[in-house]
Image: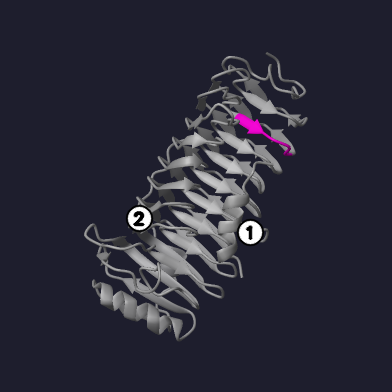
């Protein structure tokens, strides 16, 4: 297992294939919108004080639904409390965004995220953009959205973009439970897990029909980083992400029980130092299932970088109708580096450079160079 002690210590504070085209305010109403009037409906005018007041009131009730002004941009100019731009969510609250944006104002000073779901909080978000959160210092997690232990997030038809964390989870940080559907995590930055980071043995993330693209981590986990817990990426695209200089994992860095099903992990890039491993597409050190998935055209560069497609360190890996193709590394193998045998079913490891598997300490059964 990689040495993640420093990151784990930081995490302790918070514990206790076609391109996806989204229409954040399109004609298809979400289930919550289509259900008609709701007893807890609150219409929120296009002003940040009104939004803050609405959340405060909703936290004092139960099962409130906040209906934001259509296509409004709610500008946050200062932190509400600590490093939260808005009151933390402590009850069950649904936000119907109607194409609105909640963003850190470009003129804002100080360090703060956009949304925080506290223990016991249950936040459901529809058709909303969460943009521009910025947090600094250690330990801090989730510049766009943080989901604390015991908190729950459901993100539907939404976008989390251009958020930046000095440490972990530029877009989203998950210690509780997160469900992300038909959404985008794009153009976020962090040191670890630029699009989304997950910590904690009970943490769970499910990403479905979503796009994780153009995120940049300065160390590892360009798109997604799952340190612990369970995670599923289904019918989604984890493409065009970058981990610039670290352990690797340009697309995904995972020690969780991870399933990637019907998804692409393509065109990601990782740069590593001379003493670090690799994994342009995926760096894995836990249980990994790739089913009907593509890990293709990823690149790992620098030093003795290996495993342009997948670098597996001690994990139990299963491929089922999966493809690891067209990946490249600085030195062999270009496709797969692994120190454990894999269970490969009707899958393809081919056309990787400089080799598919030759140079790996263990050659997966059926991998031909």
Q: Which mark is residue 200?
A: 1
Q: Which mark is residue 24?
A: 2
User: Label 2's element?
Assistant: loop
Q: Considering depth in this image, is 255 or 349 the residue closer to the camera?
A: 255
- Indicate the quadrant where residue 78 lies: bottom left
Where residue 323 appears, as percent x and y from the top left, is: 61, 28
- Residue 311: say if magenta: yes
**Which quarter of the rendered picture does the N terminus lie within?**
top right
> Label 1 neighbourhood size at 10 Å, few (<14), some (14-19), many (20+)?
many
Q: Considering depth in this image, is 327 or 179 the residue closer to the camera?
A: 327
Residue 177 located left or right of residue 219: right
Where residue 368 appears, as percent x and y from the top left, is: 70, 15
Start and end of the magenta stretch? 310-315
- Pointers 1 and 2 in contact (CB under 8 A)? no
Residue 342 located left or right of residue 336: right
**Which quarter of the rendered picture does the C terminus lie within?**
top right
Q: Is residue 135 above or below residue 335?
A: below
- Residue 109: say if magenta: no
> Label 2 neighbourhood size at 10 Å, few (<14), some (14-19), many (20+)?
many
Q: Is residue 141 above or below residue 360?
A: below
Q: Considering depth in this image, is 294 or 77 the residue closer to the camera?
A: 77
- Indicate the quadrant where residue 305 lies: top right
């Amino acid at each position: 297992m990689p040495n993640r002690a420093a990151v784990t210590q930081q995490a302790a504070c918070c514990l206790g294939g076609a391109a996806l085209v989204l229409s954040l305010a399109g004609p298809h109403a979400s289930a919550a919108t289509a259900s008609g009037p709701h007893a807890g409906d609150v219409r929120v005018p296009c002003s940040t004080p009104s939004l803050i007041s609405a959340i405060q009131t909703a936290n004092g009730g139960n099962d409130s639904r906040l209906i934001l002004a259509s296509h409004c941009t709610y500008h946050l100019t200062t932190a509400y409390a600590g490093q939260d731009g808005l009151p933390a969510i402590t009850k069950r609250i649904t936000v119907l965004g109607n194409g609105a944006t909640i963003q850190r104002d470009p003129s804002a000073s100080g360090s703060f995220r956009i949304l925080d779901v506290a223990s016991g909080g249950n936040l459901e978000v529809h058709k909303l953009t969460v943009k521009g959160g910025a947090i600094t210092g250690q330990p801090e997690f989730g510049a766009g959205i943080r989901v604390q232990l015991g908190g729950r997030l459901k993100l539907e038809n939404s976008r989390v973009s251009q958020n930046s964390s000095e440490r972990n989870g530029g877009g989203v940080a998950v210690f509780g439970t997160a469900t992300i559907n038909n959404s985008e995590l794009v153009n976020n930055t962090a040191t670890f897990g630029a699009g989304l980071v997950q910590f904690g043995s009970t943490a769970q993330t499910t990403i479905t029909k979503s796009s994780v693209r153009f995120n940049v981590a300065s160390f590892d986990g360009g798109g997604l980083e799952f340190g612990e817990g369970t995670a599923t990426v289904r019918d989604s695209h984890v493409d065009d992400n970058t981990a610039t200089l670290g352990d690797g994992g340009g697309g995904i860095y995972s020690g969780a029980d991870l399933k990637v099903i019907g998804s692409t992990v393509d065109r990601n890039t990782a740069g590593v130092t001379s003493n670090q491993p690799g994994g342009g597409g995926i760096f894995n050190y836990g249980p990994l299932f790739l089913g009907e998935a593509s890990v293709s055209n990823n690149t790992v560069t620098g030093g003795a970088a290996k495993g342009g497609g997948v670098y597996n360190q001690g994990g139990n890996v299963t491929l089922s109708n999966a493809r690891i193709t067209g990946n490249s590394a600085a030195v062999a193998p270009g496709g797969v580096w692994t120190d454990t045998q894999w269970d490969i079913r009707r899958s393809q490891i081919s056309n990787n450079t400089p080799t598919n598997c030759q140079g790996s300490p263990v050659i997966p059964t059926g991998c031909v160079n």
